[in-house]
Image (tube, rainbow, N blue to C red):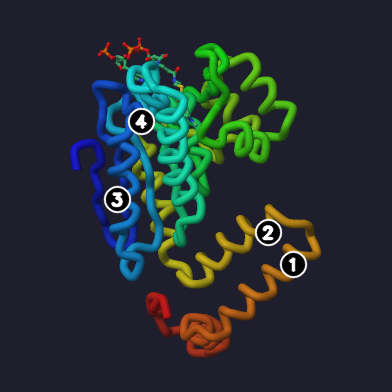
Amino acid sequence: MEFILYEVNGAVGTITINREKALNALNSQVLDELNATLEAVDLDAVRCLILTGAGAKSFVAGADIGEMSTLTKAEGEAFGKKGNDVFRKLETFPIPVIAAVNGFALGGGCELAMSCDIRICAENAVFGQPEVGLGITPGFGGTQRLARLVGAGMAKQMIYTARNIKADEALRIGLVNAVYPAEELLAQAQKMAGGIAKNAPIAVRNCKKAINEGLDVDMDKAIVIEEKLFGDCFETEDQKYGMAFFLDKNKEKVKEPFQNK
Ligand code: DAK
């Protein structure tokens, strides 16, 4: 891998987009390597992922404008599909993914962060969808995911004006969940990921599925999705252990890690 670093600490995997010279812009190779990295995650061992960018300046400064500038219609479609497939893989990845946004998250970078389950950012983070200034629309799901996250009115304002927003505004509109000093960002992401990784993995996965799939359908159908995934938990050893531990009156007992079974 030239442009992706992947490291595992305990049950938390960290993927770093490592193309610092181009502010981690997404070219075809980065997208291919990100896809291959996700394919290779050991889901028996890793229970939460963190996605971040290399360096102190940028998470991802968008799709690679140099590469895009010469694309034909067919090549543009192929590039769009490559990106959309990997973003969708991230969004529907079985385990949660936290975007630790350490600087610019523009265009495809903002869209990449929005494909993650949770976004936290550094104080120097900058978000925006500058595409209309380049003569294109957001193409990696920006019109869809931004509207779902911050509401149609705010998404339309950001997309039509192509204005960048800073971390405090991103927090105010609900695009990120928390803002930290840059030097604390990764430790905070690790802490959150570690907390998620301690919970019953199958239950966490089912929650992700229930929220994602439920948001795509009406409430009557959404509740049925939740019921099914709730029911599935009762086939797991982790549910039996988790409830038995709660009911056990021996307060000296130490809770064992969940088994992912
Ligand atoms: N692509 C390629 N290279 C980039 C880049 C990008 N998006 N962003 C930055 N770089 C490169 C710069 O060219 C520069 O390279 P060198 O000149 O050193 O070789 C290096 O990174 C450092 O950048 P700057 O010198 O510009 O650094 P500054 O601090 O002055 O400015 C900046 C930082 C982030 C404000 C600026 O670099 C900037 O405005 N970058 C472009 C941001 C942007 O417009 N991003 C959105 C790209 S459009 C599609 C699906 C999706 C998309 C398209 C199609 N289909 C469905 C087909 C997505 C589109 C986008 O993401």
- Residue at image point 33% right, 30% down: 27
Q: CB under 8 Å between callouts 2 and 1?
A: yes
Q: Amino acid at mark 3?
A: Ala
Quadrant location of the N terminus in the rendered image: top left
- Residue at image point 46% right, 25% down: 73
Label 2 sits on a secondary structure element that is: helix
Query: What label does residue 36 carry, if any?
Result: 3
Rendering quarter of residue 144: top right
Query: Which residue does the numbered mark 4 point to in the structure image?
Result: 26
The yes-or-no answer for disc 4 within 8 Å of ligand 1 is: yes
- Residue at image point 56% right, 83% down: 243
The mark nearer the N terminus, 2 or 3, is 3
Residue 111 versus residue 217 in the image, above or below: above
Query: What label does residue 223 carry, if any?
Result: 1
- Residue at image point 53% right, 82% down: 239
The mark nearer the N terminus, 2 or 1, is 2
Q: Amino acid at mark 1?
A: Ile
Query: Which residue does the numbered mark 2 point to in the structure image?
Result: 214
Quadrant location of the C terminus in the rendered image: bottom left
Residue 25 versus residue 100 in the image, above or below: above
Q: CB under 8 Å between callouts 2 and 4?
A: no
Structural distance between the alpha carbons of marks 4 and 3: 15 Å
Nearer to the camera, 114 or 185? 114
On the image, the x and y values in percent for residue 84 come to 48, 41
